[in-house]
Each structure stands twice: as C-alpha cells, then as structure tokens.
Amino acid sequence: MNFSPKHILLPFTFSVAGAALASFSYAAETPPPEVEVREKQTVEALQQRIEELEITLNERLESLADAVEANPSAEAVSSNRVHIGGYGEMHYNNLSIETNSETPDQDFRQLELHRMVLFIGYEFNDWARFITEFEVEHVLVSDGARGAVEIEQAYVELDLQKNMHLKTGVLLAPLGIINETHEPPTFYGVERPIIETTIIPTTWYGAGASLKQSFDNGVTYDLMISEGLKTDDPTSNPNAEPFNLKQGKQKASFAAAYDMAVTARVAYRGIKGLELSGYTQYQPDLDQSAEISYADAATLVGGHAIYQWDQFTAKALYARWQLDGDAAADAGKDVQDGGYIELAWKPAERWGLFARQSEWSQTEGESNSQTDIGVSFLPLEDVVFKADYQFQSGDTQETQGFNLGVGYQF
C-alpha cells in the first residue's frame, strides 16, 4: 500500500488543532455572556482559517503527487548527490628470469589480486563537488605483508567557468597516457606500460592544486603546483638507491614541501581520433631539505600522440628526466629517459590485439628493452580478460613469459 504525505500529515495536523481548540474551550471557567460571544467568534475564525489551510495544503500535495507520478525518478535524481564507482584487477604472472651474473636463474609464478579501488563522489551543487579514490593493493595490509592502503585522489573541484575548473587536495599529475586514466579496460596488456611505471612513475599523485581550461578548438591546458619528489640521500643512508625517482613519491603522507613542483600540460584533441599532448614538470630540489642538500633541480619533459582510425589505434610516448648537480652525474643518473610505440587492432567489438615496443635507460651506459604482444576480450564493456607475452632484455638479466589478467570498472 502506498502512502502519500497528506495521508500522514493532514490527520496529524488537524488532530493537534482539534486538541488545541478543546483545551482552549475547557481550560477556562464559564465566562460572562459578552466574553463568550467574543470567544465563539474567535473559535469560528480559527476553524475557518484551518479549513482554508486544509484546502491550500491539499492542492499543493495533489500537485506534488501529480508531478511525481508524471516523473517518478525526478525527485530521486535531484536528491542523489552521492556517486560510487571503482575498478580492480587480478593478475597471474608466469616468467623466467635469466641473469647475466652469478645469481641463479629464477622462475617467477605469482597469482594475486593486484588492486581493488573504490571511487566516491559527492556533488555539493552544480558547480562544486568532492571526489576521492580509495585503493587497497595486494589484498593484505599488516606487519610483514606487502600490501598498501592508499588515497590516490581526494579533492574538491570548483567550476570557475563553464570551461575552467579548479581542484585542490590530493591529485593525479597530468602526465603521460595512463596516469589519470588507468582502469584495466582502458589499456592493453595485463601490466601497465613499463615506461609509465618507471620513467613516469604511475600512479603518480600528490597534494596540491591544479587549474584546467578547455577551449572550443580542442586545446586544453593544465597547471599544477604540488609536493615534489624526495629521493634518498646516499651520503646518510648507505643502503639507499640514489635518485630512484619512483621511490621518491611522497604520496601526500607527511610530504616535505620545502620546494614545490610545478607541472604543466597542453593537449590538442580538435581532430577526430587524434590526441597530441606535451608536458613538463620542474622541481628545484629532489632532496626536499631546508639545508644544503646533495640533490639539485630535476626537470621532466615528455609528450605523446594517439591516433585512432576505424579499427586501428597507434600510440607513441617519450619522456626524459634531466637531473642537475654533480651527485646525480656521479651516480650516472643525471639523464633518465624512455619511450614506447604501441599498435592495436580491434577486428571485432569485443576483441583487441596489440603489440608494444619499449626502450628505456635509468643509468648511464645501461639500456633496457621490452616487447609485449597480447589480446584483450571484453564480454562486457566494463569487464576485460587479458593475455600477453613479454620479452624483456637488459644489461643484467633477461625476462620472458606470459601474463593473464581480469579487470573491471564501474
């Protein structure tokens, strides 16, 4: 049985009114005739006012009921300001590692739920919202476990204009192809492209603020100021790996902010199927120290191109770090760069094939390469099964084998 607001509100309203009138009538002693006449007139006026209010309220309730019947979801949609989403992926890795040293060869077999992520958003109104991303990696987070709990995004976004947006909080850096969009159905390969997990240390986020503006001609730009990287000082920690940029991510956790990083990106998407993007980041001090430090400034410059034509997609990305100072040069880490080319073919709506070639160097005199080929099957638009074969070669070891994965987004 359905109850409208008037079924509950009207009886209650008039019961209270009736009780009030009865109390008014019986509470006083029997008044003189002239007072009784005035009271009777007052009661009659109150009763008339109540009847008028009843008529008005009934008209408004019936009008509201008609509107809800005409569009039952309108009220729910207008009041539903909370949005929930997420993604996750499970991987199986079967790799053989051959070393070029006295270290014995290894067989690597591993099955794990790599990550599970939840998005929660709240709309304050039509121009202000809050967005957060909560992630659990490797299932277990406890002493001795390698898992992690991370808040990769947590920011307030304000629409300054229709095409201009300000974000403040924990943000993803506007760098690379997958740093901001890395849900499993959106990229090929079980593992993320290695250039975008080494040279561009995806997923790369930090505390700060950013401004984004888009234009009708397809040009957009991003400006961001945020915490910088903080690499270990080998002079005070003999076990530290100097100038390891991926390990230098502070992740907005007690982040040292003596020297903030500035990031900029310009992208063009004015031609159907084409995306061109260039980006840079500058940070004055990789040591993030208030005192004289062993590290100097670091500058990242990169860019990518994506072109999709019918069933074919081609991607190319290159990124290069320049680390200033004698310490970085002495460690052979002053230049760290890499790039990849990826070709994909989607012969059917639910099937896709790809091949990717990556080349990179993180230490002077050393070079690495990796070839990936694989297939993706999407039984649903937001669910993907993946399989690929990889061959990686470097100065110290060679790794080859296959990977299987399943991923989803919602």
Image (cartoon, rainbow, N blue to C red):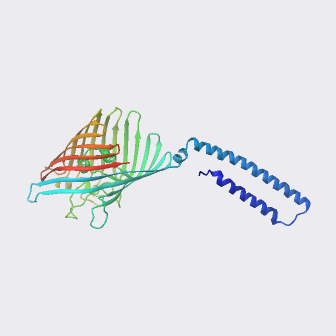
- Asked whether 82 or 4 is in front, the reply is 4
The quarter of the displayed image where residue 13 is located: bottom right
Residue 242 is left or right of residue 12, and the answer is: left
Instruction: Residue lying at the far right in this picture: please name it.
Output: 33
The quarter of the displayed image where residue 287 is located: bottom left
Residue 329 is left or right of residue 180, and the answer is: left
Residue 277 is left or right of residue 159, and the answer is: left
- Asked whether 167 or 143 is in front, the reply is 143
- Asked whether 96 or 164 is in front, the reply is 96
- Asked whether 124 or 228 is in front, the reply is 124
The quarter of the displayed image where residue 290 is located: bottom left
| Tally of numbered tags | 0
Percent position of residue 47, x then y? 78, 53
Percent position of residue 142, x then y? 31, 66
Percent position of residue 50, x then y? 75, 52
Instruction: Residue lying at the far left in this picture: please name it.
Output: 102
Q: Residue at x 79, y 50 (%)?
A: 48
Q: Residue at x 51, y 46 (%)?
A: 77
Percent position of residue 329, x then y? 18, 52
